[in-house]
Amino acid sequence: MVPITINKEQPGYILNSLLVPFENAGFSLWINGIASPQDIDKTWMIATGSPLGPFAIADIIGMHTNYEITSQNKALQDVAAKFKEMIDDDKLGRENGKGLYTYPNPAYEQPDFLK
């Protein structure tokens, strides 16, 4: 843990204030048929050098949490419905080995994923 100064409290503090809009942008690209989760992750990883894209992070967070967050946003009701469908299909993310990726050894960890 690294201590940081919070000058003023707000819901989500710093991390979630950055993470939620990032995740929601990726989810909107997906649900609107712009690109697949894998291609969205690849784009982010190549462009930023980040080891994870929004959907790899979504799998780590887990589908229950993703559902709860998106279901509270009227603009993301289609995304929430998709996460609910995944939960009903027992695709919970990294916690049970299947989600947007399959674990162990998800595609985004493979050496050729960014090619």
Image: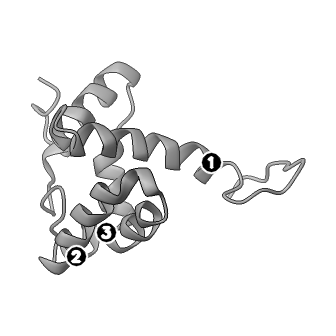
Instruction: Determine whether, in the image, residue 30 is placed left or right of residue 115.
Output: right
* Residue on which disc 3 sits: 63
Label 2 packing within 10 angstroms: few (<14), some (14-19), many (20+): some
Q: Return the residue nearer the eye: 63 or 95.
A: 63
* Residue on which disc 1 sits: 17
On the image, the x and y values in percent for residue 57 come to 36, 52
On the image, the x and y values in percent for residue 91 come to 17, 71
Residue, x 46% and y 64% (percent of image)? 69
Tell me the CA gap for discs 1 and 2: 25 Å
Q: Hey, what amino acid is under mark 1? A: Ser
Q: Hey, what amino acid is under mark 3? A: Met
Q: Given contact means CB atoms under 8 Å apart, are the residues at marks 1 and 2 in contact? A: no
Residue farthest along the right direction in this orientation: 7
Q: Return the residue nearer the eye: 75 or 13.
A: 75
Q: Is any part of residue 52 visible from this angle? A: no
Q: Return the residue nearer the eye: 53 or 27.
A: 27
- Say which element carries label 1: helix
Instruction: Determine whether, in the image, residue 20 is placed left or right of residue 58.
Output: right
Tell me the CA gap for discs 2 and 3: 6 Å
Residue, x 46% and y 40% (percent of image)? 22
16 vs 87: above or below: above
Residue, x 40% and y 38% (percent of image)? 25
